[in-house]
Amino acid sequence: MNLATPIGQISRIGPIYAKRLQRMGIKEVKDLLFHFPHRYQDFSNIRAIRDVGLGEVVTILGKVLDIQNTRTPRKRMNITEAIVEDASGAIKAVWFNQPFLLQNLRPELHVVLSGKTSFANDSLFLSNPSYEVTRPEQELKHTGRIVPIYPETAGITSRWFRYVVKPLLPLAEKFPEYLPPEILQRQAIPRLSEALKHIHFPPTLEDAKLARKRIAFGELFLIQTVALKEKMKLRNTYAPEIHFDIELAKEFVTSLPFTLTDSQRASAWEILQDLEKPYPMNRLLEGDVGSGKTVVAAMAALQTIKANHQVAFMVPTEILAEQHFHNLTKLLDPWRVTVAILTHSAHRKTSQKVKYSAFKISKTRVAKETAEGKIDIIIGTHALIQDTVKFQNLGLIIIDEQHRFGVEQRAALCKTRTGNDEQKAIPHLLSMTATPIPRTLSLAIYGDLDLSLITHMPKGRKEIITKIIPPAGRSEAYQFIREQIQKGRQAFVICPLIEESEKLEAKAAIKEHETLQKKTFPDFKVALLHGKMKGKEKEKIMKEFQEKKADILVSTSVVEVGIDIENAAVMVIEGAERFGLAQLYQFRGRVGRGEHQSYCFLFTDSTAKTTRARLKALLTAKNSFELAEEDLKIRGPGDFIGSRQSDMPDLAMASLSDLEFVKAVRAEVEDVLSKDPELKTNPLLRAKYEAFRKEIHFE
């Protein structure tokens, strides 16, 4: 047997169990060894029966004197009672609805019982204890030690996992240690093989803690190695050096109908400095919804265009492409920049004859003029990466709400119109996001990106009045919304689910839409938007809402990354306690974009003090970055960034709440790469790095 042995070939695992394990992603022996306990029960407190006290978690070793099943007459519950004795005395053990124990724990068998003591009918007893039939030479698995509790699935219990995993632990030695020994020594962590043994069956809780730390350290080490190697890879490529034209920057700032904030100026300065460097910029521009990221991006685009390079501006949806086309046309019009849009349904370019105007041209012509260098900046969805679009001299790529865009993807955009030749230079990249990223995530996950932060909102922006609405205040809130709509405003209603769920008492968008349209606001037009709709349908609904063809838009979280609706003045969030703070902050940012006073109502049925305290943080936080850090502490990284989507191992994910730990890992990675950039002196680490890079789909 080896690490690649299919689980179906392991003793005790037949086709049925193999199928159940595969549902958990466990296919081979190595997967079982990396299926870690999520907690432990400390059953190491072994006591003589005479020393057992009430309410204690204890372990006793003894012999079964008697065992029998009885059934309660009213509840029809099966009760198994056993009498177990050691040299100091005897105690009763009681189990509920486990009649099969009569076959497992027969009289005269020596057993170990671990559990909590209770008191009833004038006697002390062990309630539902874990049990294990023992022999002198046998090492305990389920009792008398630190016992692992695993993530389970239907038909597979932690007890079953312990039976199967324990005999496999010697195979842990087959995992090569890829971390240099000096790192293990500095960080006081065990070798990987020892960590794997101790994470499953630790001698002490401290050993379990160290084992988890070693595995998390290794996972984060690989993640950060991938990120920093990507950064080094970019540094070794060539990018067009775009001269920082200070006079042009001043002209642009003077042309704006508003004053830039200090953080906009600082971010623009960082970006324009990067564009001058001979290697590609890889910068992420973070800022709240409405903080003015597009203006900063426009300044970078203008500098690039005036240096005789083209700009590609990629967005996730067609309607966002339209919004950016409209905004950039206005911002760049004084310099007679040619702006084009290319999406499934839109293909236009700006007119140099009429201010702020554009005319429709064919998709073929947009692509042709882009390839000929006649289009300065082209805006579109990911269709821009397709082979039909070529650039003559691409210098800058701007992406909205996508942090990852690798060297290969950039190179694909650099092909000439013939498709035969490629530019030697790799374009600069500026990503933009309204999602605040806590410091630990920035270091660990986005370590290949340089960060620029816009922390201030534009001057004159009215503060959004935010209130927590309990059930008793719902009618009053609805009346206020009615008055706002009668004044010509519009409202969002955000729901956490698409359909009703028996498990989650949350408002569902479909049901809520029906209620609001038929009962609450029958005289208004209520639209519905959710993630199960097709892209075209979603964009059609958003466009109609933008055009004021609907008064209220009921939506799930798909509206989080959306377009500006300047007329929307009310944001209602149903089941607000079910969203993260950073997400709530972004929802709120969808209103307050126009001249009207805006409002955000957090509807919640929860009476828990912790819920109220968490929601109140939204009322007092100065910006989304502050909230993001708080959110990370409260909910954990898995919920914060979506563990299913992140491709991150669970222990690495859990460690992202510890800034000092993340910084320690990063320091070690930087030290290794500074001495050995290609990892030539550590082939095991290099092999692990290459495999891990493919595993997490880093692009």
Image: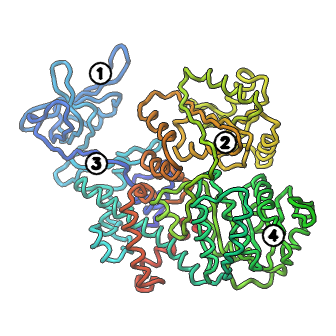
In this rendering, does residue 194 appear at all? yes
The kind of secondary structure element at disc 1 is strand
| Between 680 and 85, the one nearer to me in the picture | 680
The residue singled out by tag 3 in the image is 147
- Estimate the spatial distance between the alpha carbons at disc 3 and disc 4, rounded to whole Å: 70 Å
Q: Earlier in the sequence, mark 3 or mark 4?
A: 3
User: Quadrant of residue 401 in the image?
Assistant: bottom right
**In the foreground, 301 or 635:** 301
The answer to whether marks 2 and 3 mark residues whose Cβ atoms lie closer than 8 Å is no
Q: Quadrant of the C terminus?
A: bottom right
Residue 279 image position (x, y, % from top left): 61, 81
The first of marks 2 and 3 along the sequence is 3
The residue that label 1 is drawn on is: 70
241 to the left or right of 54: right
Q: Position of residue 28 (x, y in %)?
A: 47, 61
Badge 2 element: loop
Q: Nearer the viewer, residue 114 or 54?
A: 54
Check residue 27 in the rendering and tell me which mark sits there, or answer none. none
Farthest top residue?
A: 74
